[in-house]
Amino acid sequence: MLSADQRRRWRRYWDRQSRGYDRQMGFFDRVLFADTRQWVCAQARGQVLEVGIGTGLNLEHYRDDVALIGIDLSPAMLTIARQRAEELNTAVELRVGDAEALEFADASFDTVVCTFSLCAIPDDRRAVAEMVRILRPGGALLLADHVAAAHPLVRAGQWIAELVSVPLGGEHFRRRPIELVRAAGLRIEGHDRFAAGIVERISARVPAAQPRDRVRAGTAPPGSAGGVAGRGGDVRRAAGRDPGLPRSGR
Ligand SMILES: C[S@@+](CC[C@H](N)C(=O)[O-])C[C@H]1O[C@@H](n2cnc3c(N)ncnc32)[C@H](O)[C@@H]1O
């Protein structure tokens, strides 16, 4: 888990990135990521948490009837997300939060979304375990990111790039979230990898009987995704609305 010093450091880093973020990400959305934001958001249902929501570039792609909360480490990124939500007249609750220690109760969301943030979250394994913890049985985990390329030569280039990008910006190019998702016991329902295997998107579902249920019963292996304890706070109260209600004004 992030120490207070690390949290401050990465918060400052992303606060600084926030001003140029939309322009920079807009370029990658156009040339590399294709319709990934639409692909992910169209599958989100019910009570939705977006982890590392950034400036809210996904907001326009959600269905009207989801109840959405977004968390991010960076207040400056969230300020831009808030402006975007106002411009779009979209209902979303935005909070500062850490993906590695989500402030929500176990099994409190129908969907968790995370796009292009697992590459930047220091402990991606812990973040995925947290996402799984807060999903209800049958809930959906929707991920998209740039990942380790399929071709070894491209992967070698990514390894070289990481020598600079990891210490300077915490940016990883060779992660494979799908392996963490499989290890957590979720069922992969949709999977797509393109652009030389650099971009990967995943739609996975928590089985009806979750590993964490076995943890409560004392039968799960130590260190499994179910081993992360809840930190309280009912999401229905947090969202301030019923998940069945349509979002306002759209
Ligand atoms: C590359 S941006 C992606 C933003 C957005 N998801 C998108 O699709 O455009 C990475 C985001 O992850 C956030 N982030 C990094 N570490 C985090 C953490 N531990 N908890 C929450 N957010 C984090 C950053 O503040 C930043 O907004």
Image (cartoon, rainbow, N blue to C red):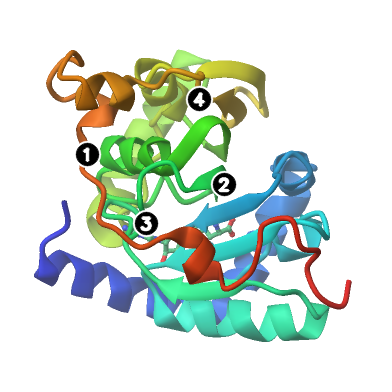
Ligand 1, seen in the image, is in the quarter at bottom left
Residue 97: image location, x then y, percent: 35, 67
* Local crowd size for mark 1, using a 10 Å CA cut-off: few (<14), some (14–19), many (≥20): some
- Which of 116 and 45 lies nearest the eye of the viewer? 45
Q: Which residue is mark 1?
A: 228
Residue 118: image location, x then y, percent: 42, 45
Q: Earlier in the sequence, mark 2 or mark 4?
A: 2
- What's the CA distance linking mark 1 and mark 4? 16 Å
Q: Amino acid at mark 2?
A: Val
Q: Which residue is mark 2?
A: 113
Q: Earlier in the sequence, mark 2 or mark 3?
A: 3
For the point 53% across and 85% down, the residue is 79
- Which of 48 and 99 lies nearest the eye of the viewer? 48
Q: Secondary structure at mark 3?
A: loop
Q: Secondary structure at mark 2?
A: strand
Q: Which residue is mark 3?
A: 104
Which is more foreground, mark 2 or mark 3? 3
**Label 4 close to label 3 by CB (< 8 Å):** no
For the point 70% across and 41% down, the residue is 40
For the point 71% across and 78% down, the residue is 85
**Label 2 close to label 1 by CB (< 8 Å):** no
